[in-house]
Image (spheres, rainbow, N blue to C red):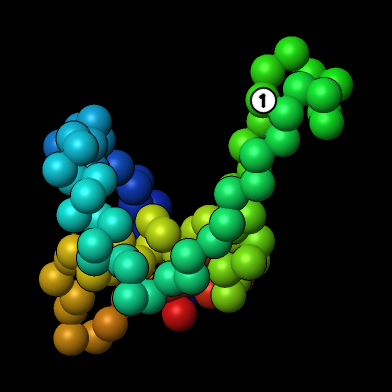
Amino acid sequence: MAQSATRWTPRPPDATLTAMPTQDDIRAAAERIAPHIRRTPVIRLSPAETGLENPLALKLEQLQVTGSFKPRGAFNRMLSAEIPPAGVVAASGGNHGLAVA
């Protein structure tokens, strides 16, 4: 059975997804996702400890349930979007897919 060739055309980017977030946007996102994520520690290392010229800060996002920072973005998007009755599908079996699930 022959299939007709359909050409996929990407839709134009949504301005709300591509605009640089403001401080208010960041604060609102932090409040929106706070009940759903773990508060992870930051470890600060001095140049003497690392051999680098500058201090180093490590945010331990591997302590999230998914083992990555992905829940932050996925939760923010899901909690700020209108979810269709059919639900959503994540095209990832990795950390992002776990966050969406």
Q: Is residue 42 visible?
A: yes
* Percent x, y of residue 34: 33, 68
Q: Nearer the viewer, residue 42 or 30?
A: 42
Left or right of residue 89: residue 97:
right
Left or right of residue 82: residue 57:
right
Q: Is residue 77 visible?
A: no
Quarter residue 45 falls in: top right
Callout 1 crowding tier (Cα within 10 Å): few <14, some 14–19, many ≥20: few
Quadrant showing the C terminus:
bottom left
Against 40, residue 35 (above or below) is: below
Residue in the image at 29% along x and 42% along y: 10
* Percent x, y of residue 5: 39, 52
Q: What residue is shown with label 1?
A: 55
Residue in the image at 31% along x and 66% along y: 33
Residue in the image at 57% along x and 68% along y: 64
Residue furthest bottom as drawn: 85
* Percent x, y of residue 11: 23, 43
Q: Residue flagged by tag 1: what amino acid is it? A: Pro
Against 2, residue 42 (above or below) is: above
Left or right of residue 4: residue 43:
right
Against 25, residue 73 (above or below) is: below
Residue in the image at 67% along x and 30% along y: 56
Secondary element at tag 1: loop
**Total marks in image:** 1
